[in-house]
Amino acid sequence: MNELPELDSAALKAKSKLIWIFAGFLTFDLVMILIDQDYRGLIRLVLTVLLMYLALQGQKWAKWLIVVFASLGIPVSLLVTIAHETMIEMFLSLILFFLDVTLVVHLTRSKPLDRYFDYKRRLSSYKS
């Protein structure tokens, strides 16, 4: 029987960093839901958690869907930062801009994270 190799520490650190970025997004969403008192945002929050979970399980389509959404969020948050009406809008849009850029760069450029995703996919096919 073929044994799966262990994950290296860099891949595990990359996964941890991704989880922290995801936690930042979820915290941001919760704050926005509370500020706006628009509880329909909870539906978006649940879908976001599901998408993030599937990405962490190695689903390529989920990873790339997150990349697309975050990439679209970059110019939007930058425009809101430039055309802000209040300082809080500017501050929140800068946070979102930072989170979007960090997420896109980490998902598309991190080789250790790619190793983690490959491991999860191999583990999934190994169990089948």
Image (cartoon, grey):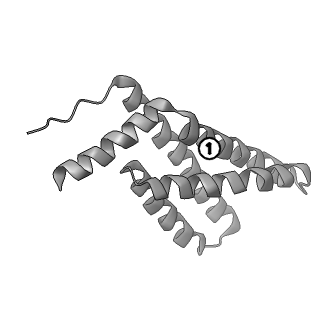
Judging depth in this view, the residue of 63 and 39 nearest the camera is 63
Residue 87, visible in the rendered structure = yes
Residue at 44% from the left image edge and 30% from the top image edge = 112
Residue at 70% from the left image edge and 67% from the top image edge = 36
Q: Residue furthest bottom?
A: 40
Residue 98: x %, y % from top left? 70, 41
- Considering the numbered disc 1 on the image, is that residue within a helix, a strand or a loop? helix
Residue 118: x %, y % from top left? 36, 41
Residue 20 is left or right of residue 82, and the answer is left
Query: Which corner quadrant holds the C terminus?
Result: bottom left
Above or below, 113 against 48 in this view is above
Residue 78: x %, y % from top left? 82, 49
Residue 9: x %, y % from top left? 35, 24
- Number of callouts in the render? 1
Residue at 58% from the left image edge and 58% from the top image edge = 30
Above or below, 115 against 26 in this view is above
- Amino acid under label 1? Val
Query: Which corner quadrant holds the N terminus?
Result: top left
Task: Provide the residue designation for mark 1.
Answer: 104
Q: Residue furthest left?
A: 1
> In which quarter of the view is residue 120 placed?
top left
Q: Residue furthest top?
A: 9
Residue at 57% from the left image edge and 35% from the top image edge = 109
* Crowding near the residue tagged with mark 1, few <14, some 14–19, many ≥20 C-alpha atoms within 10 Å: many
Judging depth in this view, the residue of 30 and 66 nearest the camera is 66
Residue 15, visible in the rendered structure = no
